Amino acid sequence: MVTHPQDSANQKYKRRSRQALRLMKVLLREFRGFLICACLGFTISVLCLYSFYPRDLVPGGKLSLLQTAYYTVLMTFFETPLAYVEDWRLAPIFFLLPVAGLVTIAEGVVHLSHLLFQRKRFSKEWQQMIAETMDDHIIVCGLGNVGVRVVEHLRNIGEEVVVIECNKDNRFAYEASGFNMPVLSGDARDQTILETASCRSAKAIIAVTDNDLVNLEACLTARELNPGIRVVLRMFDQKLAKKMAKVLNFEGAYSSSAKAGPLFAQAAISGHILDSFEFAGTIINVVQIVVEPNTALVGQTIDELRERHEVTVLLQEKAGGALDWNPAPANTLAVGDKLLIMTDPDGFKRLEPATRKINLPRE
């Protein structure tokens, strides 16, 4: 499967669409009381005018609901489409409707200006309002060295994120808010802060603070609020992490040091290794290979590479930049191509002769 440049453009479009939708949710949430009162007052005014206003004073002698609504709008803006009548049921409308309209409009403009100002500054208040309208998102607890990389990765793959960080002076908070992600200040174990982060509608929580008990308690509280939420937490003790994941039915509990250990060890053997992990008792390495000129790789097909060196080719990035996931067996390797390969620890040793430059005879 080939990845085209328009894929990133589609991601940007989706991200902007979600931001616009969140803005509408915030506005509707903040103006909910305002809109209810305005609609209620308008409806009562229309019904009173339609029911009690004398028809003989209306041009044409007829008054429909649509006409009444139109006249009510004009009266709200200090217009006088209808003559005043001495009727206690109608008099308040003639006196109060224009004043109420003026106050409502002024209040709406001031409140809207305040919200737009908060949005432009991406203030803490605005971030909290955005967080309260999120759904199908991921909550990240802890914005340390691990947390900020988790947030960055989630953003790169197009996920919606709310961050909870207890340290108001955290050095990564400004960087995270620069991604237009809400960063809430508070204790991730606190039910109130998790509810503010819309935990009940979140699809996952990732707890990566530097305190195992904080991570565990935050995830347990999140499970109480949302039994279906996916839980991933960081624990420094790998044995305890495995037990917690099994006993509490968490989707993942990992130790950063345990995850990094195999990578450091394998990286000492080869600088081409991007990642290293254990599966079914075997160390699996993810390796990047660049097709250099004057090497045996040039001109080989993907199928020949797989068969000769017993490796799995996951991705081929061609010299022009096009990405081809699970490349076809007949694809030919050219100078400048990059390959993402998965193999066992001896795989790179099998590949090394093919990546070594051939000494061409001098003319």
Image: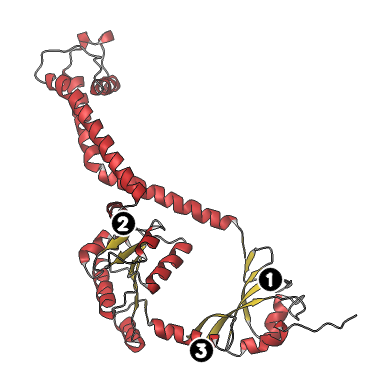
Find numbered disc 2 in the image and state the secondary structure of the residue it sits on: helix
In this rendering, the answer to whether 111 lies above or below 224 is above
Classify the position of the N terminus by image quarter. bottom right
Residues at marks 1 and 3, CA–CA distance in whole angstroms: 27 Å
Residue that numbered label 2 is attached to: 131
Q: Mark 2 belongs to which amino acid? A: Ala
In this rendering, the answer to whether 363 lies above or below 1 is below
Find numbered disc 3 in the image and state the secondary structure of the residue it sits on: helix
In this rendering, the answer to whether 293 lies above or below 17 is below
Q: Mark 1 belongs to which amino acid? A: Asp
Residue located at (34% from left, 89% from top): 239
Picture coordinates of residue 210, whole percent (x, y):
31, 77
The residue carrying pointer 1 sits among few (fewer than 14), some (14 to 19) or many (20 or more) residues within 10 Å by Cα, namely many
Classify the position of the C terminus by image quarter. bottom right
Q: Mark 3 belongs to which amino acid? A: Ala
Picture coordinates of residue 261, whole percent (x, y):
45, 87
Q: Quadrant of residue 3?
A: bottom right
Answer whether labels 1 and 3 touch (C-beta < 8 Å): no
Residue that numbered label 1 is attached to: 337
Residue located at (68% from left, 86% from top): 352
The residue carrying pointer 2 sits among few (fewer than 14), some (14 to 19) or many (20 or more) residues within 10 Å by Cα, namely many
Residue that numbered label 3 is attached to: 265
Find numbered disc 1 in the image and state the secondary structure of the residue it sits on: loop
Q: In this view, which residue lies farthest toward the right?
A: 363
Please report whichever mark, 1 or 2, sits nearer to the chain's N-terminal start: 2
Residue located at (34% from left, 52% from top): 122
Residues at marks 3 and 2, CA–CA distance in whole angstroms: 41 Å
Can you see residue 279? no
How many circles with numbers are drawn on the protein? Answer: 3
Instruction: Indicate left or right for 99 with 180 as reference.
Output: left
Answer whether labels 3 and 2 touch (C-beta < 8 Å): no
